Amino acid sequence: MILLRLISWQYTRKHLLRSLLTIAGIVLGVAVFVGMHTANQSVLTAFTQTVDRIAGATQLQISAGEAGFEEDILERVQNVPEVRVAVPVIEAVMNPQTKSQANILILAVDMTGDRSLRDYALESGDESFIEDPLVFLAQPDSIMITREFAAENDLKSNSELTLNSMDGPKKFIVRGIMKSSGLTTAFGGNLAIMDVYAAQKIFGRGRRFDRIDVAVQEGLDPAAVQVKLEKVLGSGFQVEPPSSRAKQFESLSSVYGMLANITSLFALFIGMFLIYNSFAIAVTQRRSEIGILRALGATRRQIQVLFLAESAVGGLVGAGLGVVLGILIARGIAGSLGQFLGEVYGVAQKAEEVSSDPRLLVGAMVLGVVTSLIAAWIPARNAARVDPVQALQKGRFQLLTAGENRMRRWTAFGLLSFVGVSLAFGHGRLIFYAGYFAAIFAGVLLVPTLGLWLARGMRPALKAIWPVEGTLAADSLIQSPRRTSGAVTALALSVSLIIALGGMTQAAYASIEEWLRVALNPDMYLAPTQNFTDRSFRFPAELASEVEKLPGVRRIQAVRIVRLPMDGEPVMFVALDVSSVTQEARLPIVSGDGPTMYSDAAAGKGVIISDNFALMHNRKRGDVLTIPTPGGPLQMPVLGVVVDFSDQKGSILLDRSVYDKYFKDTSSNVIRIYLQAGVTVGQMRERIAAQAGTRFRYFVFTNEDLRSYILKITDQWFGLTYIQIAVAVLVSILGIVNTLTVSITDRRRELGVLQAVGGLRRQIRGTIWLEAVLIGAIGLILGCGFGAVALYYALETSARDLSGMRLAYGYPFRTVLALIPIILGSAFLASLAPAEAAVRGSLVEALEYE
Amino acid sequence: MNKLVLFLFAGALLAQDARQIVEESQKLHRSRSQQYEGVLEVYDTKGGKNEKRWQYARIGSYGESRSVLRFLAPPLVKGVALLVHNHPDRASDQWMWTPELNRDRRIALQDRSTRFFGTDFSFEDLEERDVDQSDYKLLGEEALNGQACYKIESVAKKSRTTQYSRVVIWVRKDILLPVQFEMYVKAEVVKRLIHKRVEKVQNVWSTLELEMNDLKKKTRTVMKTEKLKYDVALPEEQFTLQALRRGE
């Protein structure tokens, strides 16, 4: 502690900027980790809170995935003696025409029994007079809203509120205003209650419910009643406590969580090299200080502990700053992330407040400190090994020895051999990821050698163009590889990450665009909502029949999309007329015989699964899937595997007839329309308007609209990737600034001598500029090489564990072209301040340095 | 004459047990059918009043009757109807019809404890109970509003679903008509039903005004009966779900 205060603190104060730059990597890594996870956590918390608050006294919820079920199920549940209350529910999000324009969560229940589950504390305090329950039930336009929503939108009792129902815009009357309570704070207070039977009509549910909320008889164990209900209803129904809905959402958004982990860990990994670099240089610079300490009796262990303690304190400060920055980032992105996840997964939540998990924050602090300690471990060990006599001799630098370099090279070759073996023979996850890490470490170990070779290779060209500055810059790198290897490694890793992400993005866009071209080729679409992933509203079967009969329509496909649980995860089922699809679209086949596969699927003899579902769920052609349906488990063989990007978690295509039969649901989420030759989308839009009028709520989308929508979602998704790229670039710039700052300090005497013997300021400045650009160029070249390997692993990781999407390898040359000016320009900009510091410093002081 | 017969009859019952009193009471006021128009006045804590009118029709004897209650006013609830099929051995079946939605809904057994459309009655309070569905105990005799009454405790049998732990009934000794009920949840009286106006209609002692008091919420609902008729010819089909849907 005394040493920390007397020695380390003094050193840090003297080199404050450098110290801050050193911990910047930790700050960024921790900030990204905390920011992305906290934002994700906030969205999840908002969803969980909405579920909890809406659940009230509900102990179990019965659903059949998103498909819903017929009304008679309610009576079966109510007849179970262990059930105290069973209430039907429909839940949907709408955008009412109000002042605030905010979405509102509609909770539709049967009010005759629901008060046993939920407490609707009414504003009037007396439901029997002001809020007439009979009128509420008798009039389908009745709605009850929260006090907060009423205040925000200037609504009061008996005010009108317009909602877009399946039957077009419909005026509702506010027949109840709820006081602030747990329930009313659900969905940020934007909650409305209506009668479930009125909601069936409004949302196009027919005579179906979304779920049943259940409370068990007093004194009974809900888990036991859950088992009983599962037995009574069969495997087509999910009987779960309300909390499991949050788990499903968590499972859906797990890809985002993994991406957040990868980004932040990569940032920390790169930051680790910054710390390593700084400490390695600090040990070199402070060798005389170490020598004195050793001469005064400090043990090797004390020296090692001193440096590790410095690193731990730095890590702690960095992690602390990172946590603060992370929470600020989370505040900024939670709302838009919530909207984005809502759009991708169609899940209702409203993330307005940031909720930080103390465990996450503590974990982030520990991560920051541990990263810092790991980074400082080797420099601290080297510091402990400093020979006091040698250290006190002025001018003797401890350089990277040839032996040390040789050992690194051999280790790297050993690791690369393992990588080769893992790629050739290792299909298991463990060996694959072991190979991945071995490749990273091999690259890291080879950076000094490869950097040295590149610097030597570039020296003649630099000398030819800038005889003095070029030679000095190249020599600086060649003579002190240890000083720059950390920055070069950090930069190379950053560039490789960018190449991998850029390549993956490029491959994903190419694959999605191709899929859009061959699979989603209808001329137009009719959807009940503006958002394709929102499945709150459904078209009744008659609309599809009416549209089919319109002149100019060549073909329609009424598609029903539902998520159903498979292997414990919600999986997207796409039910449509398979024979119709095969005549219009050509989904690329991964496995299976095209004509047989499609004709068997059309005959209801099996299902076709997407490639990513096959990969993620380890299924193949010939396997038999057990699909949970309200009519009981449905055994369907997998007839084939196709490329389909309908959902990140994979999709299952089944014929509409099978779905209708087992789910007794003829509604649709979207109607695909193929037009006859010569008929334009505009003409058809008019014909649909004339036919449907205001009887139905619908939105018309052209093929281009849908493509833009999907690409917008893809853009948003890859927006996360751009955050990763930004972090990578930022960390690498910090690395260069740090290295140059250290380099200038380290070479003050050398630079002073140069000036003393007639070196011009311009030459000194140019040398530092060139040195920075050289570091950038070497990092860029190595990064481009590493990136080729990293891209392979990124695509494999994505296919194996993230989305199951097999994307074609294609090196992102355009990304490289874009990176050249960014990295070299950043390196140059990073050198401006250190170069000025070098030429403006006192010559006498510089010569006195050391 | 009638009074004398009743007096002698009631006197003979003195020695009988509580179950017999209730059974006799039910028998005495039994009719093949019944029809009336009612007014429902719901008073809130501040004295505010909400009024609704309805038409009621019933066929079948007590405990196994079928009834239809259809609201006539105010306009917002006009046409809303409730069909009740009472059973001697189990809880009744109840359906509600909402014309604006053009559909019916079944009132689940578990929902019977909830309030009947904002009144102080619960759906359960509207049910007819066969004498065999409860156990009775004569608590004694007590004068109520100057009338001598039997004070009887009724506890639902285990097979029956009810929200009440017990109900104390005051049965007028002279005409064997229940005139007050106190409903208990555990040891606490939660509701009190008072038969405020009792008159003879077509030779049947009938309650023409009922008042249900929610003692916890301190609210009350008054139910007034008008145009009461017994043994009117009502078609069986009128008491079906199909008829309910047709708005008959």
Image (spheres, coloured by chain):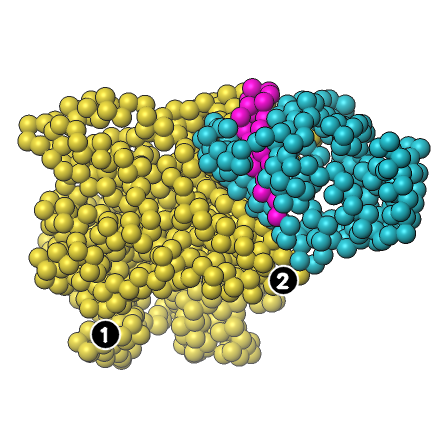
Between residue B219 and residue A475, name the one nearer to us: B219
User: Which residue is drawn at the image coordinates 33% and 49% (left, top)?
Assistant: A664
Question: Residue A427 shows which numbered tag?
Answer: 1
Secondary structure under badge 2? loop
In this rendering, the label closer to the viewer, 1 or 2: 2
> Does residue B35 appear anywhere in the picture?
yes
Q: Earlier in the sequence, mark 1 or mark 2?
A: 2
| x and y percentages locating residue A178 in the rendered image | 61, 32
Secondary structure under badge 1? loop
Seen in the picture, residue A86 relative to A712 is either above or below; the reply is: below
Residue B27 relative to residue A373: left or right = right
Q: Amino acid at mark 1?
A: His
Image colour for chain A is: yellow
Mark 1 and mark 2 on one chain: yes
| x and y percentages locating residue A438 in the rendered image | 27, 73
Residue A616 relative to residue B7: left or right = left
